[in-house]
Image: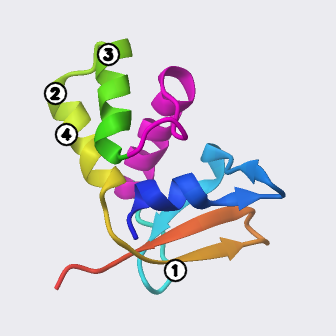
Amino acid sequence: MNVFTALQFLQINHEPLNHTNVIITDPEGKPDAIMSELLADVLNKIAIFGDLNAAGSPEGIIDQLRMFTPLRDDVLDEYTKILTQDIAGINFAARKEVVELIYKPLV
């Protein structure tokens, strides 16, 4: 599963996931600041300019952003990388009120 697929399927109380409560962590649960900031950036743009549910793929959401924003191709390439990042699992950290997407470590 990748980040895009997880974001499409995750719901809390039958509502779409609040994009401000999603972070990327390593397998030990340590937040990855760079990846989390990139994810927050792309999710903020999607909230304003895109429709995650209407996009059938990461490329679909990138096409929406390309159409409705002046973002450069290098920025959209980075957004594609975070959306296609494979994840090993999902952790609901109730005390911290966040959803942790656990990335697969590079081998």
Q: Which amino acid does label 1 sit on?
A: Gly
Q: What is the x, y in percent for residue 46?
A: 49, 32
Of labels 1 and 4, earlier in sequence is 1
Foreground disc of the pair 1, 4: 4
- Residue identifier under label 3: 67
Please, what secondary structure does the residue beneath circle 3 have? helix
Q: In which quarter of the image is the N terminus?
A: bottom left
- The answer to whether 6 appears left or right of 103 in the picture is right
Would you call the spot at circle 3 few (<14 residues within 10 Å), some (14-19), or many (20 or more)? Answer: few
- Residue identifier under label 2: 73
Q: State the predominant SS element of the stretch in magenta.
A: helix
Please, what secondary structure does the residue beneath circle 2 have? helix
Of labels 3 and 2, earlier in sequence is 3
Please, what secondary structure does the residue beneath circle 1 have? loop
Of labels 2 and 1, earlier in sequence is 1
Q: What is the x, y in percent for residue 104?
A: 33, 78
- The answer to whether 105 appears left or right of 72 in the picture is right
Please, what secondary structure does the residue beneath circle 4 have? helix
**Residue 29 has which mark?**
1
Would you call the spot at circle 4 few (<14 residues within 10 Å), some (14-19), or many (20 or more)? Answer: few
Q: Quadrant of the C terminus?
A: bottom left
Disc 2 versus disc 1: distance between alpha carbons?
32 Å
Residue 86 falls inside the magenta stretch: no
Q: Please provide the residue range marked out in magenta.
A: 34-56
Residues at circles 4 and 3 in contact by the CB criterion of under 8 Å: no
- Residue identifier under label 4: 77
Foreground disc of the pair 3, 1: 3
Residue shown at 36%/46% (left/top)?
57
